[in-house]
Image: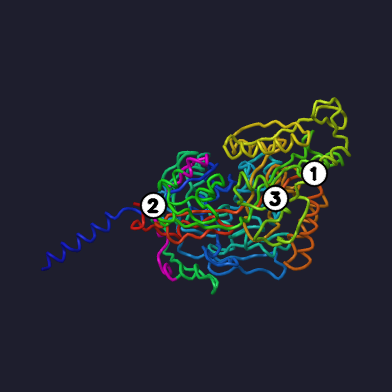
Amino acid sequence: MKRLIAFAVCLAAGAAVAAPPKVLRYAFEVAETSLDPVKVDDLYSRTLTPHIFEAPYKYDHLARPIKVKPNTADGMPQHSADFRTWTVKIKPGIYFQDDPAFKGHKRELVAQDYVYTYKRFADPANKSPIWAGLAEDKFVGLAELRQRAIDQRKPFEYDREVEGVRALDRYTLQFKVEEPRPRFIENIAGADLFGAQAREVVEFYGDQIDAHPVGTGPFKLAQWRRSSLIVLERNPEYRELVYDAEPAPDDAEGQALVARFKGRRLPMIDRVEISIITEQQPRWLAFAGAEADFIERLGPEFFNVAMPGGKVAPNLKKKGVRAYQQIEPGVTLQLFNMDDPVVGGYTPERIALRRAIGLGMDLMTEIRLIRNGQGVPTQSPILPHTSGYDPKFKSEMGDYDPARAKALLDLYGYLDRDGDGWREQPDGSPLVLRMATQPTQRDRSLAELLKKNMDALGLRISFEFAQWPENMKAARAGKLSMWSLGNSAAGSDGSGILSRLDSRQVGAQNIARFRFQAFDTLVERIRVIEDGPEREALFLQAKRMAIAYMPYKFRVNRVLTDMAYPRLVGYRRPVFWQEWWHYVDIDDSQAPK
């Protein structure tokens, strides 16, 4: 009998070992740029990094309205009455994933790791696109430490202590900022950028660090073929963390997810395989053919195929496919390079040109034909779901009025002087708009519509094609005249998007290179005061100023549609944050037959 029992135990153990791994498969529509948080600023890289690295705080996965709660922190932060000093306790007993850089020793997460992480953004050698935004928080002494390295042309002094970010002891982290930051907790809830990195790992791998992300998070990098395939696997050293969330009492779906998963150890899946498929048709076909479990941001080209009449297509519904929709906390926007000799500048005629271009853009046709109705015209820079957003606010930003556009051009001297059908500049010189874009089918369709719109105004336009990462690099360097891209909120504070117009962010977030002191002063005031009527009034001023000078044409707030097969269980689209893979399960019994 004992032998039989032992044999049965062995069989059971063998069955457990042989159980197939739970794998989530889907595709990004844009390639990642890096896996080193200090180098990234794009949505797709920032979807990968927070699954590897961890910030002190995180967003409750199911809470709506949003709620921030401890992650690696031991309790909520303590702050001074003036919101200038924030103190965080780090939980003991959290460890980095094993890595050769640790030379066979277990490496515990400590407060100094976060100090080092923040200092990496300040190190001029890293050329971080995030530094300008981080500098706006005015950490005491951090910008000066950076400038010291620049002035002395010496390596950044990581060992020099600054008051702005320091470890008071092994597990106590303290931030000090020069001005009040009432919403600072959201800054330390962003694992995509500010998840802890170990100094010895960065120094061990040197300029290859972007291929060796080592964090304390639920997953670790298993394979990376740049711009092709990224594979993350469960981190076997991940601490014991269980599913828990606080959905609203009337949130039936959220309550059902908690009831199903509460107490389950995270992550619930073993592996995530991300392919890069930049064209919408093959990405859709991969999902339709069940080669992917999930499709994020369904291309509008296939919306009527997938969801005719706004409902899941019968052939997909029969397979158990579900759709998830929400207006994104983001926007598509078109930049005008304010340093450009044609569309840039602050003189009345240049402002009139940009306004005319904006008024001549037929956003409703874009939404109807190219986006299949999945969007609404944007009225202001402030993003949905963030503070300062007013769904009742209306402005010229959302108007399509070719007659008014032509009148502006005529009034400010943009005339067709030689009768060839194209307008010249006020001084009589040729006028050619230059628009950068990408060679995808959707971008080509958008370019065709824009050309048609500009032709109707008598404005000649040419298009320059390159891949998205190359265009972003060129935009930051001030080399593009016009370009369109998307922007997503990273938190509930509506002031984040205003970095796009802050002169201190030129070359980083401010890719339009807009410089206006009155706007900078307004933004600074918005950042330091608490939420309330005064702050809302300042947001209104910022909206009006952005609309008046038009360094960007804010175009469309998209309706995002995600779809999933029933084998993906527990999905809910995050509002601002990007990490969600560890909160879902894979049920292979529900796989398409």
- Which residue type does callout 3 highlight? Ala
* Measured Cα–Cα span from mark 3 to mark 2: 43 Å
The residue tagged 2 is: 23
Which sits earlier in the primary sequence, circle 1 or circle 3?
A: 3
The residue tagged 3 is: 143
* Measured Cα–Cα span from mark 1 to mark 3: 37 Å
- Which residue type does callout 1 highlight? Arg
Residue 497 picture location, percent across and down: 69, 53
Q: Which residue is painted at 59% across and 38% down in the image?
A: 469
In-front residue for pair 63/205: 63
Find the magenta span and give its range: 259-284
Task: Decide if residue 235 is on the left or right side of residue 20.
Answer: right
Magenta stretch contains residue 271: yes
Which sits earlier in the primary sequence, circle 3 or circle 2?
A: 2
Q: Which residue is painted at 76% across and 30% down in the image?
A: 432
Residue 524 picture location, percent across and down: 76, 57
Tag of residue 355: 1
- Which residue type does callout 2 highlight? Val
* Measured Cα–Cα span from mark 1 to mark 2: 49 Å
